[in-house]
Amino acid sequence: MYKSRIRTALALVGLMVGGAASIGAGCGGVPQDAENRCNPDTFFPTPICAQDAGTDAPAADAGDAGTDGPTADNGRCPMDTHTCVPLPEGDDAIHWHPNEPLVVWFGDNVEGEENQPKCLADTAPAVQARMYSDLIAPPATCDACECKPATGDCDPVPTSITIRAGTCDDQSATTVPFDGPSEWDGSCTAVNALPQGAECPPGSGVPCLQSIEIGPLPPPQNEKCEVDVVEVPKVVGRITKWQTTSLACRGENDTSLCDNPGKMCLPQVLLPYRVCIWREGIHMECPMHYQGEPARWMYPEEVKEGRGCTECACGAPNGGACVSSLRLFEDGACAAQFHEKSTASVGGDCDPIFPSGRALGSKEASPAMYMAGTCEASGGEPFGGAMADMDNAITFCCRPSYVFAG
């Protein structure tokens, strides 16, 4: 089915609006069923759908005309611009579209419309297809992955609050707990209050409140780092270039214009133009009479893209902490403050109290703040590659020499 569609398309390529007569001089007419037939699925579009007649054709060279071809004088294969060329021969010659040789330009793929190859206006003006080879497709360039500042929850209540009947360095001092109530949230509380002049132990004459030891805050809870903006970074660079390009052109060809039915009347062309036959797919061997150079594999411009970037991720926060402050009051309603101590989750501390033996009526912890840790971002690495579209590859086999002999 596919080959039938291609053959139908190839039979139509000689048709050009207003120019069919000029390109077919002496080489046969345009098929009657070609008009208005455009197939968007065929890889080689018909000229009525896409045309590109060039005006930069090189001077014709008739030095390679077939000896069995008629001359221009008898109205057949015009020897000043054409020559009779053998059709492909061999076991698989039929698969090479023997009735449809093309004039093909091969060369470097350069930028700029003015630098692009053109079809030969006088002999093969209709563009059949532009194809490419020698793909350059380095790995993708990806956006860098970043993490938002870490977040976490903090408890403002120290793990312990202890009254000491001695200095902070006195390991033998009597201690009295001054913790808050169960499930304390840090709000003002008079739990475990100590009156002025309290002695520890009672009757010892040793003031209870000489120093106060405050334990660390609990470590941060629910710490996390989130990816900044996107989870999958966009590709910021996906370079795709072709080093080599080809332009396949056609005029009108007819085996009836040569005395030998095994030959076809084709334009005479000079390098970098060549007379070539073509076949879908990748093929290593060329048929007889079209072995002037190794088979050339050409591909559509659009590649099969497989390049991308790995998903961004963020590791667990490292180095986060909680900070708060503990305030001590003489009264039981958190009105008469006499001491304030900064607290943190990274360690406790002990402060002396002056004068010793004073009343300790209530306490209050300020709301805790989370000090964000650092998060290490990962991901955003390029992967995959771009490949030529092998499914729509075309193999060209071309005639030898600069001017194609009969």
Image (tube, rainbow, N blue to C red):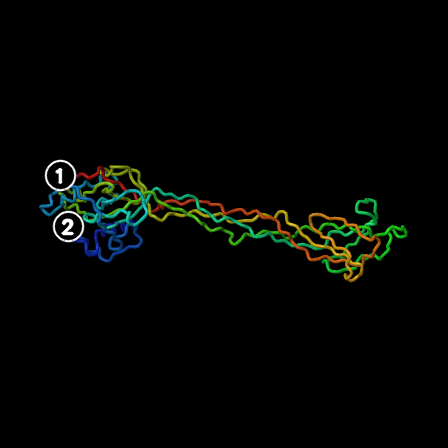
| x then y, percent, for residue 359 | 83, 57
Which structural element holds mark 1?
Answer: loop
Residue ID at (19%, 39%): 403
Coordinates of residue 29 in the picture (x, y in percent): 16, 52
Query: Residue at the spot x=18%, y=38% of the render?
Result: 405
Residue 94 quadrant = top left
The image shows residue 203 at horizontal and vertical percentages of: 90, 52
Q: Residue furthest right?
A: 203
> Residue sitting at 53 percent across and 50 percent down?
146
Percent x, y for residue 370?
65, 53
Outermost residue to the front: 355
Residue wearing tag 2: 25
Q: Name the front one of labels 2 and 1.
A: 2
Q: Residue at x 77, y 52 (%)?
A: 161
Q: Which kind of residue does numbered mark 2 sit on?
A: Ala
Give the number of marks: 2
Residue designated by label 1 = 67
Crowding near pointer 2: few (<14 within 10 Å), some, many (20+)? some
Q: Is residue 125 left or right of residue 390?
A: left
